[in-house]
Structures are given as C-alpha cells and as structure tokens.
C-alpha cells in the first residue's frame, strides 16, 4: 500500500539501524510462492498443508470443553516453561511406540517444532557456526538457523537418505556444532534414512561428540513398509528429537515437543523463558484431553489411509502423464515427494508456465543449503483430493512434455 502514512513508516524503518540478523534474513520463498498459487483455479501442490477435511473438529470441540471442565482456571493460566506435566507425561509413554525413550523431565513442550529449531539455534549456534545438513534439507530449518548466522555443510543424499559416509571428512574439515537431519519421510524429498546409515551416523557423531538434531514431524505417518528405529533409540542423549502435533492433529494448535537429555532440556527451558515464557496453556490442555484415551492413534490410522491413497493416485498419474526423463521419489509416508527433471531444465523457469496451466509446485533450489538443485521440485500429496491430484499432475505433465 502506498498511503502517505505507510510511506513515512517505510522511510523511518530504512533509516533505523537494524540488527545484522534482521538485515540479512530473507523471506521464506515458499511463503512467497504460496501467495501466487492461492489464485482461483490453480491446483496447488506447493504448500505443506495437511488435509483440512481430516481435522478432528468434533473431537477438538469436545476436548476444549473437557479442558475447561477438568482443569478450570488452570487451563487459562500461565504455566511452566517446560509445558504442562500431564501432556509431558503422556508423551513420554506414547513416543516409546516409535522407539524414543524419554522421561517426562526429558520432554519440553514447544510452539511447534519450528520453535524447537529456533531453540536449537539459540543454544548451539553463534555467527559462523557450522551445521551439517542433508541436500536438500528443510527450508524452515535454514531460516531458523540463518537467524543465528550459521554456515552450512551440505551432504549428498541418495535413496537411503544422507550419504553419511561423507560426514566424517566434513566434520574433520569444518568442525560443525551439530548435524541436522529429517530422518523420516524428509521434507522436501520424502526419503527415509536407512537403519544402517542411522547406526553409522550415530557412531560418527559419537566419535566427535557432535549432537544430532532429528527433526521428526512425519515419523508417525508411515503408511507402507517397516518402521526404522529412531536415531534417538540408537544414539540416546547424543540425539535431540523434535516432535509435533502439526501433521497428526492440526498445525493451527501450534504444539510440538523436544525430547532430549535433562541437561539439554534445562538449557532449552532457559532460552524459552526469554522467547515466550511458555507455550499456549489452553492448547496444551486441549491436546491432552484429545490424546489421553487413545483418540490420537485412531486418528493417525485415518490420516494414513487417506495419505496412502493420495500418494498412490499421484504416483500413478505421474507414471501415466510424465514424459521419459522425469524422475520422482516414492515415499512410504509423510506428505511430500520429489521430482528431478533433466539437467537442462529449470524448475523455477517452468513455474510461470505451470501456473498459467493451472498447477503449482515449489522449485527445489531453496532447499539446497549450498546452492544447486535448479532442476528439482517438491510436490505435496496430502492437501489436494484425489480427483484434483490427477488433474493437477496431467497439467504438469503437459508443461513437461513441451520441454522434453
Ligand atoms: C521438517 C520440518 N520441521 C519442522 C516443521 C515445522 O512444523 P511445526 O508446525 O511443528 O512448527 C515442518 C513443517 O512443515 C517440517 O516439515
């Protein structure tokens, strides 16, 4: 907007001295792309949104009433920076199913795992500190760590996840502060780190005493194949695991958790006090009321069924509509799959044409901490309904066919 008042505000801000980090941090490109792709008639595979029609609206309504009935004014009061004890205790039992062993004192509730990433940055990173990442990696982690002016050493991935055989040399050369991975159904690639590689990664991290951060929003969303033991179940206190209810209940509630050693959680707690005092008390009680009697497990089964079908539909449509030379991953869980075009094509250049043709995606390059990936793109398969997925993939295939 260009009212005189707004112009003045812009002038003032440009003359104020901002912090180095505020001047350097760029907007999240996905959020920028999402603005374009919200136009009507566009089938968007660009966001990372869960399916809204699967949100447990009635159950959350009831849980909200129960939170007030059972906890009264406490549900609306300030609470502990660590989070409400009821939810932490429940989580410490529940995550065992997924192989993670943590006591109530080893779980800290966060405002989504994105806050977990910010707290990791606050605790471990100074200007120029090095983080080892997968290639590609989660853009939101780069955005969180950029605030602490981190540098990155990107390690290649193949179908078994991060090529951990490269990690030791990188550690010797760059002396990193931490290793960041999304071991299960990675955002953006959909790839899962193999068991053999998990063991190797823990052994290397142990040898050099470097913490591993396993950002795990999708671990509960395996709809095919065998579970792989979590990095934390292999590496214990060496591993800091980030969890969230965003993809298994709703992202709007903004509740996640960190599972880490007691000492590390205590340090996170001190950082969190300065950030937000504590996570939303009411949302924590609502989630507790929803999960405490097994409703979450039933709900997860329902979501998995639907996402399995959508992934199936997307892959089948891609096999039918994409020309030869376009490669894609076949994730066994999560929300995303990853496309690699022939080298000569740029996913960014094709985006305009795709949007003209009524379909949107996120180009892959922003997920590369050290550049590259111009011919890659991320597709989300959880948000659009099956008939829209088929139509959207056909539209994308038409664009590819013009260039291949
Ligand atoms: C790998 C990864 N980490 C963290 C987040 C942030 O999740 P939350 O909604 O819990 O903050 C996401 C969301 O897409 C993600 O994919």
Image (cartoon, helix red, strand yellow):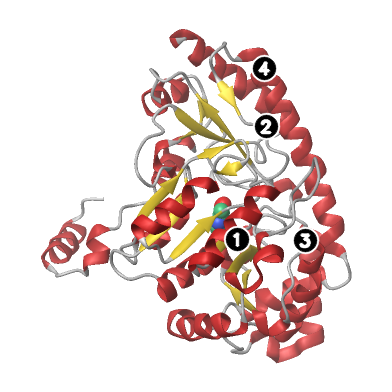
Q: Nearer the viewer, residue 401 or 10?
A: 401
Residue underneath mark 1: 202
Q: Measuring 39% from the left and 45% from the top, which residue is drawn there?
A: 29
3D distance between C-alphas at marks 4 and 3: 33 Å
3D distance between C-alphas at marks 4 and 2: 11 Å
Can residue 149 be seen here? The reply is yes
> How would you rate the neighbour count of disc 2 (Cα within 10 Å): few for under 14, some for 14-19, many for 20 or more?
some
Of label 4 and label 2, which has the lower sequence position?
4
Secondary structure under badge 1?
helix
Q: Which mark is residue 98?
A: 3
Q: Which mark is residue 319?
A: 4
Check the image and report above or below for 93 versus 132: below
Check the image and report above or below for 242 versus 50: below
Residue underneath mark 2: 330
The reply, left or right, for residue 213 in relation to residue 68 is: left
Residues tagged 2 and 1 counted as in contact (Cβ below 8 A): no
Check the image and report above or below for 340 versus 12: above
Question: Which x, y percent locates residue 103?
Answer: 73, 81
Of label 2 and label 3, which has the lower sequence position?
3
3D distance between C-alphas at marks 2 and 3: 22 Å
* Quadrant of the image occupied by residue 265: bottom right
Can residue 212 be seen here? The reply is no
Of label 1 and label 3, which has the lower sequence position?
3
Of label 4 and label 1, which has the lower sequence position?
1
């Amino acid at each position: 907007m260009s009212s005189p008042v707004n112009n003045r505000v812009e002038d003032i801000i440009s003359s104020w001295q901002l912090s180095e980090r505020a001047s350097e941090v760029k907007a999240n490109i996905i959020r920028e792309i999402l603005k374009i792709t919200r136009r009507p008639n566009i089938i968007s595979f660009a966001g990372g949104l869960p399916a809204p029609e699967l949100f447990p609206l009635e159950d959350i309504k009831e849980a909200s009433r129960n939170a007030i009935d059972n906890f009264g004014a406490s549900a609306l009061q300030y609470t502990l920076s660590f989070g409400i004890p009821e939810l932490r205790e429940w989580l410490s039992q529940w995550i065992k199913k997924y192989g993670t062993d943590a006591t109530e004192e080893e779980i800290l509730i966060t405002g989504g795992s994105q806050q977990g990433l910010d707290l990791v940055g606050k605790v471990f990173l100074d200007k120029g500190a090095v983080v080892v990442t997968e290639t590609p990696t989660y853009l939101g982690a780069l955005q969180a760590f950029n605030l602490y002016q981190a540098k990155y050493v990107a390690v290649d991935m193949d179908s078994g996840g991060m090529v951990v055989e490269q990690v030791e040399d990188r550690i010797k050369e760059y002396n990193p502060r931490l290793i960041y991975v999304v071991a299960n159904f990675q955002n953006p690639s959909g790839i899962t780190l193999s068991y053999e590689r998990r063991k190797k990664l823990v052994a290397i991290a142990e040898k050099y005493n470097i913490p591993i951060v396993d950002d795990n929003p999708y671990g509960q969303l395996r709809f095919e194949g065998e579970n792989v033991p979590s990095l934390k179940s292999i590496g214990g206190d060496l591993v800091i695991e980030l969890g969230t209810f965003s993809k298994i209940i709703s992202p709007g509630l903004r509740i996640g958790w960190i599972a880490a050693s007691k000492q590390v959680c205590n340090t996170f707690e001190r950082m969190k006090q300065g950030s937000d005092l504590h996570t939303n008390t009411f949302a924590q009680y609502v989630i507790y009321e929803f999960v405490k009697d097994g409703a979450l497990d039933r709900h997860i089964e329902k979501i998995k069924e639907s996402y399995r079908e959508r992934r199936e539909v997307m892959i089948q449509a891609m096999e039918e509509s994409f020309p030869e030379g376009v490669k894609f991953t076949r994730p066994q869980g999560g929300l995303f799959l990853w496309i690699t075009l022939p080298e000569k094509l740029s996913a960014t250049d094709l985006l305009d044409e795709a949007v003209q043709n009524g379909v949107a995606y996120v180009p892959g390059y922003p997920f590369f901490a050290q550049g590259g990936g111009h011919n890659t793109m991320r597709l989300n398969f959880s948000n659009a309904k099956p008939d829209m997925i088929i139509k959207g993939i056909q539209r994308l295939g038409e664009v590819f066919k013009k260039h291949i």
